[in-house]
Image: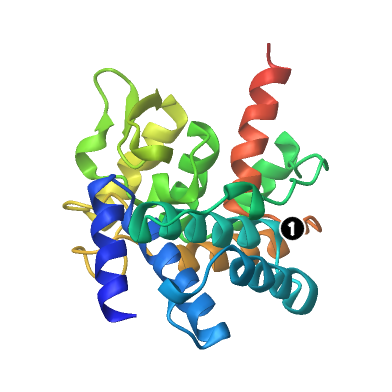
Amino acid sequence: MGEMRDRMERELKLRGYSPRTLKTYVRAVHNFVKYHRRPAEQMGAGEARSYVLHLIEERQVSRSLVNQVVCALRFFYDKVLRVPFDLDDLPYMKRSKTLPCTLTKSEVSALLKAESNLKHRVVLMTLYSGGLRLQEALQLRLADIDKAAMRIRIRAGKGGKERYVMLSPTLLSTLQDYFKQYRPENWLFYGQSKSEPLHPRSLQRAIKQAALAAGIRKKVTAHVLRHSFATHLLEGG
């Protein structure tokens, strides 16, 4: 789908979609075409429905992944091919009503103490104290830390929206220790070189190991830290 891929990438870029979303949508349509072994322009709602049912019934993928594919196919037919396509023929899956997992304050404290790597520990503190999403934290730049106003600028927010969150004195103190040891230049939390941000998998692996070391049996993720922050904020009034 060379030409179609180029057209889809252009439409996504024109609408300001993030590089991550662009990659996800293009991959979803590629897999759809690969599954049916037919050009996308020769297919429609029927083929899209059968592919989504295949993902649900045979592949048994998560609700979130199914809805990503639905979003991608809807976008492809509506904005790229511009062909008649009844969006009701390709509905989103309803979200689960289960409450999100959260950590207690003591569990958050134990998690941070169990992380011996200063860089990883300060990222976890940033996720929690700012209530940030994983990508928001990893896309932070040195210039986003405003010590004078005690706030952090979030550039990579959901939907491309910018916002500010509070910079706590405890986080600032730990960040200053981090600055002295790691000396970041552009990306606040850089990866193998200072020219690239820390990879999400590196942090996800660090969170899992820290949770094990802290004796926390819950499945701990960056998303759990974000929800824990919101819960503790509400509890504090």
Residue 65 lies left or right of residue 78; in this view the side is right
Quarter holding the C terminus is top right
Q: Is residue 148 above or below residue 184?
A: above
Q: Quadrant of residue 147?
A: top left
Quarter holding the N terminus is bottom left
Whether residue 192 is visible here, answered yes or no, is: no
Residue labelled with disc 1: 219
Q: Position of residue 111 (x, y in %)?
A: 65, 51
**Which residue shows up at 21% across the image and 63% down it?**
194
Name the foreground residue: 133 vs 91: 91
Q: Residue furthest bottom?
A: 37
Q: Is residue 64 above or below residue 224?
A: below
**Which residue shows up at 34% across the image and 24% down it?**
151
Q: How is the image coloured?
A: rainbow
Secondary structure under tag 1 reads loop
**Which residue shows up at 28% across the image and 49% down it?**
188
Q: Position of residue 101 (x, y in %)?
A: 76, 45
Whether residue 229 is visible here, answered yes or no, is: yes
